[in-house]
Image (tube, grey):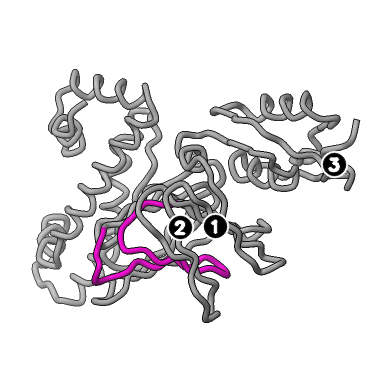
Amino acid sequence: MQDKDLKKYIKGDASPEEKKSIIEWIRKDKKHQKQFNLLKAQYVAATLDSLNTTDVNESYQRFSSKKTKKKTYYYTAIVASVMMPFLLLYFYSSFSNNDLIVNTTNYLKFGTRTVSTEHGGFKTVVLPDGSTIVLNANSSISYPKEFTDSLRKVTLIGEAFFDIKRNINMPFIVEAENLKIKVLGTSFNVKSYPKDEKIETTLVTGKVEVHKQNIEQNPIVLEPSERAVFDKKKSNIKVDKVDSNRIVAWQDGKLIFDNTPLKQVVLDLNRKYDVEFVIQSDSLLQYKYTGEFDNLKLEEVLELLKISSPINYKYEENKIMLDPE
């Protein structure tokens, strides 16, 4: 599907037949959905950038034509602050009405700059410089209204994939708990959940520098397909070679484990399926798992875990209890 056809749909100019064709195309492949999401995000960003108080005031005047024609700047400011969230909601509700859930994008011209995701979902965020971020489940990203002339800095809680516009005069900084990741223009993944024992930075393209926060020392420079793993307890960083495609496969709804301890497995399952796990015996903590779960239902994942290790599970008061066999 060509971008011009998708843009036609996004602008509301597509015919009923074209709409049907585009919806079917998006549903066929996660990559199609990503392409559509990015185009829609760019459209919203461009639309909001072109919006000003005059546009808002004119809209308000049309809306309240039966009321007094006396307007003040005070009213314009109020209308602007109220209308912007609804404008953004409008752009995205038009597609969800066709029973297709599309990951939302947040690009507000004023107001908060924190974007969050719930359990089991993810969002695409377009930053003021045109860089894009895909947030994994149960994550948040905070960024300023506008980047300064010398620095682009964001704060991450959780996991996200970054595709950063290159600007040698304005480095891009990601702050993630104990780490600071510095880039000029590149794509990489950061996993930094508060409950996890480690913070992982995986480079896909370009180069990044990984620093410990508030500690003066030489940074670790990553090459593509390298991962820096920061151990929160030991406060050290180790670098290993990885398949970066597997690391970022969560964007396609996949869960991939590579000799992963059960404690970490249940944390990842909780974020994806929004269910709490209780490990009822420390003897289970010895088990590690390697495997790929491609958009499976929770029950299917649990059965696979049960087959691969001596574990029983049961539902109890909205929790999943894990016991030894």
Contact between labelled residues 3 and 1, with CB atoms less than 8 Å apart: no
Disc 2, SS:
strand
Residue closer to the observer: 119 or 283: 283
Q: Which residue is mark 2?
A: 222
Boundaries of the magenta span: 166-188
- Residue picked out by circle 1: 228
From what the image shows, is residue 82 above or below residue 94?
below
* Coordinates of residue 134 in the picture (x, y in percent): 41, 48
Q: Which is closer to the viewer, label 3 or label 2? A: 2
**Quadrant assignment for the C terminus:** top right
| N-terminal label among 1 and 2 | 2
Residue at mark 3 = 284
N-terminal-most mark, 1 or 3: 1
Is residue 112 at all visible to an observer of this figure? no
Disc 3 and disc 2: Cα gap in Å? 35 Å
Residue 35 in percent (x, y) is at 29, 36
Find residue 124 and report its horizontal and vertical position in percent: 37, 48
Classify residue 18 as left or right of residue 269.
left
Q: Amino acid at mark 3?
A: Leu
Which amino acid, mark 1? Answer: Ala
Q: Nearer the viewer, residue 120 or 279?
A: 279
| In this view, the mark in front (1 or 3) | 1
Residue 268 is situated, as x and y percent measured from the top left of the image, at: 63, 44
Q: Is residue 62 left or right of residue 201?
A: left
- Residue 323 visible in image: yes
Q: Crowding at label 1, few (<14), some or many (≥20) Cα neighbours within 10 Å?
A: many
In the rendered structure, find residue 261 and report the number of the disc placed on it.
none
